[in-house]
Image (spheres, grey):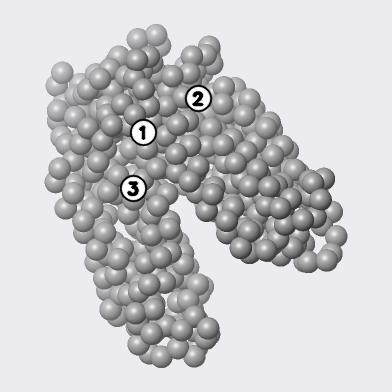
Amino acid sequence: MSENNAATVLREEKVPVGSKLWLCSADCLCSCLNSLLTGGGLTYFFTSYLGMKESYASAVWIIFAIWNAFNDPLFGYISDHTKSKLGRRIPYIRYGSLFYSLVFIVTWIKWPLGASQGALFFQMLATLFLFDTLYTAIATSLYVMPYTMAVSNKARSSIFLMKIFFTLISLGVPLVLFPIIKPAPGESCLKFQVIMAAIGVLAFAVIFISTFFYKEKVTTEPESGDNIIKSVVSCFKNRSFVVFEVLSFTVIFIQTILMQGVIYYFDAFTLPMYAAYGMLGAGAVFGVVLWAKKTNTWGVKKCVFIMCVVFAAGAACMAVFGKNNIVAAVGFFIAGIGFAGGMYLVPLMNGDVIDYDEHLCGQRREGMYAGVNSLITKPAISFANSAFIMIVGKFGFDMSKSVAEQTDRAKQGILVAWMAVPAVLLVICALSLKFYPLAGRKWDEIKAELEKRHSGTEPEGEYNEEE
């Protein structure tokens, strides 16, 4: 197949606007519930409001972390082998939404187990296990749906562009809402519980209804003889996946450490918060427009390389010269471009990796790849927190004092801890792309062949909503 013919096939594939809107809305509400519960809300409710000891809460999170590290690959394997008239993912989204919302609602009600520390420990641990298991089933299925709804990067990119807007909502709403509605120790939490229940009901309605507006177009069943260990190992035999994981780990690490550094930055330096966030937002908008425009001409690989190099240079300058407001403003702008790349380019790259796996073995294993990706990226969150604390400590930062009381060297340590490691990781990402094979004319032809294969039961170039 010629390059022009390949481009024609890919260019004609489309996903209806309604399908994209419902998918992104469901993903947004699913993430909102998770952010409200695991983003500090659960710990606050049990420790500050119900009176659970911090040591018991820490033990819950440690125990939970062990399960949390393995449930994603496990569910990915299960969903890949699911057989249903609705497809492999939609049953988990549609029928899991009710139980997911119910667990969220009853989380904020003290169970009739007594007031002992053991009772609180059991409720918090049970809540986390139930909630995260359901979240994994639904969120993983929603995460891989764009890869099953379309093959071409042009069609998928239209989903991810819309998803960026909804992702900002799912990140911002919990950060603003919870501090406003959280119950103070000793006061009635009825209003808080009613609001949380309303959010849970809304999430159920949106997630459940959304499943009637999209379906899996791209699907092939894995071989029944593949066990989970073999499936995990086979993921790492895909060289493109290994390179992708270097980038995926780095993106999660940077997102975590950048948000942590912001907490200290504005207390230590003079750049106004509104100016910093304004430049960050402007960079994100510029980045979305840039990557959306250039992906079709430069390709995903080249765009990711440019993003890594530019982001690394900006982070390095911030680590050394971030005290200067002009340098800092430019640094926030570049960070915005990087964030846009993380939300737009990385999912496209992930889709190519999954497509390449199908090209190699003739099977679709989106769930397995999503699960193994989570297994690798979740430790990035812990590493980012540990790295920041360790580095600022080396620069003499005293956690018992306010930021204003720190020495100049300690304040410089904030910049180094905040930006130096991301700069190094981004350089490693740029270098690793040398070994990423999914680019060029041959890859375009493979993508076109995959699209042709999966359009056999539908008119070529169109996405059919009807069963």
Q: Is disc 2 surrounded by few (<14), some (14 to 19) or many (20+) residues within 10 Å?
A: many
* Numbered disc 3: secondary structure: helix
Picture coordinates of residue 99, whole percent (x, y): 67, 32
Picture coordinates of residue 126, whole percent (x, y): 65, 43
The residues bearing labels 3 and 1 have C-alpha atoms spaced at a distance of 12 Å
* Numbered disc 2: secondary structure: loop
Residue 256 shows up from this direction: yes
Residue highlighted by disc 1: 369
Specify which label sits upstream in the sequence, 2 or 3: 2
The residue mark sitting in front, 1 or 2, is 1
Q: Residue at x 27, y 48 (%)?
A: 246
Picture coordinates of residue 388, whole percent (x, y): 39, 69
Q: Are marks 3 and 1 in contact (CB under 8 Å)?
A: no
Residue highlighted by disc 2: 89
Q: Is disc 1 surrounded by few (<14), some (14 to 19) or many (20+) residues within 10 Å?
A: many
Where is residue 364, by image quadrant?
A: top left
Q: Residue furthest top?
A: 457
The residues bearing labels 2 and 3 have C-alpha atoms spaced at a distance of 23 Å
Where is residue 361, by image quadrant?
A: top left
Q: Is residue 408 left or right of residue 52?
A: left
Residue highlighted by disc 3: 248
Query: Is 424 situated above or below 299?
Result: below
Question: Label 1 amino acid?
Answer: Tyr
Q: Is disc 3 surrounded by few (<14), some (14 to 19) or many (20+) residues within 10 Å?
A: many
Q: Are marks 2 and 3 in contact (CB under 8 Å)?
A: no
